[in-house]
Image (cartoon, rainbow, N blue to C red):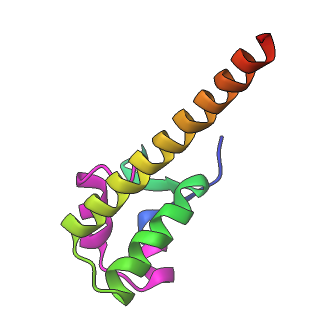
Protein backbone atom coordinates (compact mmCIF):
# COMPACT_ATOMS: atom_id res chain seq x y z
CA UNK A 1 0.00 0.00 0.00
CA UNK A 2 1.17 3.54 -0.70
CA UNK A 3 2.50 5.68 2.10
CA UNK A 4 -0.12 7.95 3.59
CA UNK A 5 -0.84 10.38 6.41
CA UNK A 6 -4.13 10.88 8.21
CA UNK A 7 -6.10 14.09 7.94
CA UNK A 8 -5.80 14.59 11.69
CA UNK A 9 -2.01 14.29 11.57
CA UNK A 10 -1.86 16.82 8.72
CA UNK A 11 -3.97 19.27 10.69
CA UNK A 12 -1.59 19.00 13.66
CA UNK A 13 1.65 19.10 11.66
CA UNK A 14 0.67 22.01 9.40
CA UNK A 15 -1.38 23.83 12.06
CA UNK A 16 -4.40 24.26 9.79
CA UNK A 17 -8.13 24.00 10.31
CA UNK A 18 -9.69 20.65 9.49
CA UNK A 19 -12.33 22.58 7.54
CA UNK A 20 -9.62 23.77 5.14
CA UNK A 21 -8.68 20.16 4.37
CA UNK A 22 -12.36 19.26 3.94
CA UNK A 23 -12.89 22.26 1.64
CA UNK A 24 -9.99 21.16 -0.56
CA UNK A 25 -11.54 17.71 -0.77
CA UNK A 26 -15.02 19.05 -1.56
CA UNK A 27 -13.54 21.22 -4.33
CA UNK A 28 -11.82 18.16 -5.81
CA UNK A 29 -8.36 19.60 -5.18
CA UNK A 30 -7.43 16.67 -2.92
CA UNK A 31 -8.49 13.06 -3.20
CA UNK A 32 -8.04 11.41 0.18
CA UNK A 33 -8.58 7.71 0.69
CA UNK A 34 -10.75 6.38 3.51
CA UNK A 35 -9.83 3.40 5.62
CA UNK A 36 -11.89 2.45 8.67
CA UNK A 37 -13.64 5.82 8.52
CA UNK A 38 -10.31 7.68 8.73
CA UNK A 39 -9.32 9.97 5.86
CA UNK A 40 -5.75 9.70 4.61
CA UNK A 41 -3.79 11.68 2.07
CA UNK A 42 -1.29 9.74 -0.01
CA UNK A 43 2.26 11.06 0.23
CA UNK A 44 2.25 11.69 -3.51
CA UNK A 45 -0.43 14.35 -2.93
CA UNK A 46 1.52 16.13 -0.17
CA UNK A 47 3.24 18.63 -2.51
CA UNK A 48 -0.16 19.77 -3.82
CA UNK A 49 -1.53 20.00 -0.27
CA UNK A 50 1.47 22.04 0.87
CA UNK A 51 1.09 24.36 -2.13
CA UNK A 52 -2.59 24.94 -1.35
CA UNK A 53 -1.85 25.53 2.33
CA UNK A 54 0.92 28.00 1.51
CA UNK A 55 -1.21 29.90 -1.00
CA UNK A 56 -4.14 30.01 1.41
CA UNK A 57 -2.41 30.83 4.68
CA UNK A 58 0.65 32.78 3.49
CA UNK A 59 -0.79 34.55 0.43
CA UNK A 60 -4.41 34.66 1.66
CA UNK A 61 -5.79 33.06 -1.50
CA UNK A 62 -9.36 31.90 -0.91
CA UNK A 63 -10.77 28.55 -2.02
CA UNK A 64 -12.22 29.81 -5.33
CA UNK A 65 -8.82 31.35 -6.05
CA UNK A 66 -7.10 28.04 -5.32
CA UNK A 67 -9.49 26.31 -7.72
CA UNK A 68 -8.78 28.85 -10.47
CA UNK A 69 -5.02 28.64 -9.97
CA UNK A 70 -5.08 24.83 -10.06
CA UNK A 71 -7.31 24.83 -13.15
CA UNK A 72 -4.91 27.16 -14.95
CA UNK A 73 -1.88 25.09 -13.91
CA UNK A 74 -3.59 21.92 -15.15
CA UNK A 75 -4.42 23.63 -18.43
CA UNK A 76 -0.85 24.88 -18.78
CA UNK A 77 0.48 21.35 -18.21
CA UNK A 78 -1.87 19.93 -20.87
CA UNK A 79 -0.78 22.62 -23.32
CA UNK A 80 2.87 21.88 -22.56
CA UNK A 81 2.34 18.19 -23.31
CA UNK A 82 0.42 19.00 -26.48
CA UNK A 83 3.22 21.32 -27.60
CA UNK A 84 5.82 18.60 -26.99
CA UNK A 85 3.70 16.11 -28.95
CA UNK A 86 3.32 18.51 -31.86
CA UNK A 87 7.04 19.28 -31.87
CA UNK A 88 7.77 15.56 -31.94
CA UNK A 89 5.34 14.99 -34.82
CA UNK A 90 6.75 17.98 -36.66
CA UNK A 91 10.30 16.66 -36.33
CA UNK A 92 9.19 13.24 -37.59
CA UNK A 93 7.42 14.88 -40.54
CA UNK A 94 10.54 16.89 -41.41
CA UNK A 95 12.69 13.73 -41.16
CA UNK A 96 10.64 12.22 -43.98
CA UNK A 97 11.57 15.06 -46.35
> Most prominent secondary structure in the magenta stretch?
helix
| Left or right of 13 on screen, residue 23 | left
Is residue 81 something one can see in this rendering? yes
Report the quarter where the N terminus lies. top right
Quarter location, residue 52: bottom left
Residue 28 inside the magenta-drawn segment = yes
Percent x, y of residue 73 = 42, 55
Residue found at the very far top of the displayed protein:
96
Quarter location, residue 56: bottom left
Percent x, y of residue 7 = 42, 64
| Residue at 55% over, 64% down | 47
| Left or right of 28 on screen, residue 76 | right
| Left or right of 92 on screen, residue 52 | left
Q: Is residue 19 above or below residue 35?
A: below
Front residue (pair 14, 58): 58
In this rendering, the count of numbered labels is 0
| Residue at 47% over, 82% down | 14
Front residue (pair 55, 46): 55
Percent x, y of residue 46 = 54, 63
Q: Is residue 1 above or below residue 55?
A: above
Which residues make up the magenta segment? 10-31
| Residue at 24% over, 68% down | 65
Report the quarter where the C terminus lies. top right
Is residue 35 something one can see in this rendering? no
Q: Is residue 88 above or below residue 65?
A: above
Quarter location, residue 95: top right
Residue 83 inside the magenta-drawn segment = no
Amino acid sequence: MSERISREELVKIYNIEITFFDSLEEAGLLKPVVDNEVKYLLYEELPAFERFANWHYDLEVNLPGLEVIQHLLDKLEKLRHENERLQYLSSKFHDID
